[in-house]
Image (cartoon, grey):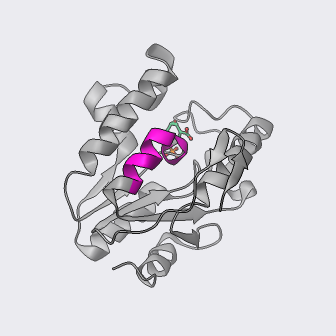
Amino acid sequence: MSGNGPWGPVRPRMSRQRTQLIYLVGFMGSGKTTTGRRLADELHWPFVDLDQTIEAGQGLSIRQIFEQLGEPLFRELEHAALTEASKSEPGVIALGGGTFVQPANMDFIRERGGTTVWLDCPFEELLRRSEGIETRPLFRDAASFRHLLEQRIPFYRLAHFRVSSGSQAPQQVVEQILRLDLF
Ligand code: S3P
């Protein structure tokens, strides 16, 4: 896919080097952490959740990092966490909702290799899961949430695989991933 996305030219779909790294991509509430942990258990691989790594490194919650340090610094920490997490293989890595749409991160993942899986979930379900949760600083209201999702979908579509994570239990999402041509 190519053309212009909301934030400039959309990059072509990634070619794939079959390293033993799986990156879970998707919007807030799509189930990246839950699915990632279970998938890693099934594969007997280590699991890294980027947001949790950043929180542990700073001794602050994601919300506090946004409020006290600002989003640009959060994005730097996120890139550093991505680089670090990608050093060891095999591994399952749950990205944050904005990780994959940052050009430097997408370029890094492309060069590092590995497999990207987009957990695609309908807007209403994402909203239901994220509403009222205080830990997500970028969640303000339904309209801005939808707008952000629409901006990001063209980037998520660049992942190697898409699995549906809306109406299914986490274990079913994991089983869908395990059925993909991953290795
Ligand atoms: C963000 C999503 C969050 C977290 C931060 C920014 C985003 O991760 O990284 O609040 O830009 O969409 P989750 O997708 O795990 O909620």
In the image: residue 94, left or right of residue 5: left
The answer to whether residue 57 is seen in the rendering is yes
Tell me if residue 131 can be seen: no
Q: Is residue 66 above or below residue 113?
A: above
Residue for point 65% across, 45% down: 9
Hey, which residue is sitting farthest right in the picture? Answer: 143
Stretch of the chain drawn in magenta: 99-110
Image quarter for residue 18?
bottom left
In front: 117, or 174?
Answer: 117
* Tally of numbered discs: 0
Quarter of the figure that contains the N terminus: bottom right
The quarter of the rendered structure image containing the C terminus is bottom left
Magenta stretch encompasses residue 103? yes
Question: Does 45 lie within the magenta span?
Answer: no
Q: Looking at the magenta stretch, what is its main secondary structure?
A: helix
Q: Is residue 175 above or below residue 99?
A: below
Front-lying residue, 17 or 151? 17
State the residue at coordinates (70%, 41%). 148
